[in-house]
Amino acid sequence: MMTYNEQALRLHQLRFGLEGKLFAAPARVNLIGEHTDYTGGLVMPMAIDFRTAAVLSKREDQRAVFYSANYDEEASYEVASLERTPKGHWSDYPAGVVWSLQQQGIAVSGFNMTLAGDVPLGAGLSSSASVEVATALALLAHAGANLPLEKLANLCRRAENEYVGAKSGIMDQFVVAGAVAHRAMLLDCRSLTFELLPLPDQVRVVICNSMVKHAVATGEYGDRRDEVESGQAVLQHERPHVKLLRDATLKDLEACKSKMSAASFARCKHIITENQRVLDAREALLHEDMRQFGSIMVEAHKSMRDDFAASCKEVDTLVEIAMQQPGCFGARITGGGFGGCTVNVVRAEAAEQFVATLKDEYAAKTGISAQCFISAPSDGALAMAANGGVE
Ligand code: GAF
């Protein structure tokens, strides 16, 4: 059996007839802190055991040739004249990273790149950040350059925001690049300072894919963000101490209720309460109080469902079934919403049975066959590279 690395290197060799160098980045799941990142709030994600590999070899001409093993498709660009013209295609993500590097003054010469990975697409597990960070690391090495975590994450976020046109926050790129195995990351998205928090040995993180597709680059994510930003603008105007929604209390929000739409009020309420839930979840984790952690997750789910209006009936069904299972501390929607996955914190010895029952009951209720994964917190791309890559 070939290792994951060997397979990606072999695919590159077969496609381009050249030895390549491999860089990898994981996917992520967010334990709590949803839609808080783009208003400077708090999040608690962890990297998971799915990866994107970017294998790169040099070209003699000045073309960027990407091959996606998942789509079995090639896309090619002239490096020197890379315009900001997304095609609505998988290659926007790696091409956006080339563009973003160039915006930073980092010149990129011709290369071939094979992208191969096992991150479920459209599941809200950040396949896009995984591609961006793996691509960026490969291209930085190719250009003989280096960037610290914060700059690397921002460069990848810029690719996604300005080239691809998805208005995401910084959470995904930051954790995918900077996570550390066995730890969740509490990230302050305003200061970009973080704390690494161990998860107790007796719990497992179970991710369940509702199989309802989610995409950050299309409609609803952007709509929610607009509603949040217009509520934030009212608060900034009415309450001078509010620089970002992060600074506002529920009292501030109540005082401004008549000046904003009902939708903006509800979205901002979710974010203000969610920031507090992240802090409460941190306390629970530090005390290894998983019951408390789980009940905070359930509150967070209700808030995403009712105030943020970003769940869907299939995901709600997954959460309802999960919460009836023995050994399940908490369950909630994770990621951008409107489908995608739930994250569940489950007693270790109950995890296998939890998965089996959840799949059966979900199929019985919806006719959909869910995919479930049990994942420990994994290394981010920088830690993987420092540890000599991933096998
Ligand atoms: C998506 C975005 F990319 C993140 O920045 C974040 O806003 C998340 O949705 C919601 O918490 O993953």
Image: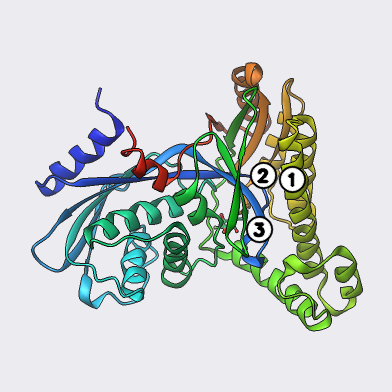
Report the Cα–Cα distance between label 2 and label 3: 12 Å
Give how far across and how far down residue 2 sits, in percent.
24, 27
> Which element is circle 2 on?
strand
> Which element is circle 3 on?
loop
Give how far across and how far down residue 86 sits, in percent.
37, 70
- The residue that mark 1 highlights is 301
Mark 3 Cβ inside 8 Å of ligand 1: yes
Q: Quick one: label 2 or label 1, which is nearer the N terminus? A: 1
Give how far across and how far down residue 283 sits, in percent.
76, 41
Give how far across and how far down residue 255 sits, in percent.
91, 73
Query: Which image quadrant for residue 145?
Result: bottom left
- The residue that mark 3 highlights is 35
Report the Cα–Cα distance between label 2 and label 1: 6 Å
Q: Quadrant of the N terminus?
A: top left
* Number of residues whose C-alpha sits closer than 10 Å to that of mark 3, classed few (under 14), some (14–19) or many (20 or more): many
* Number of residues whose C-alpha sits closer than 10 Å to that of mark 1, classed few (under 14), some (14–19) or many (20 or more): many
Quick check: marks 2 and 3 in contact, CB under 8 Å? no
- Quick check: 327 above or below 161? above
> Which element is circle 1 on?
helix
Residue placed furthest toward the bottom: 237
Residue 71 as seen in the image, left or right of residue 112: right
Q: Quadrant of the C terminus?
A: top left
Residue type pointed to by label 2: Ile
Question: Can I make out residue 335 in this image?
Answer: no
Total marks shown come to 3
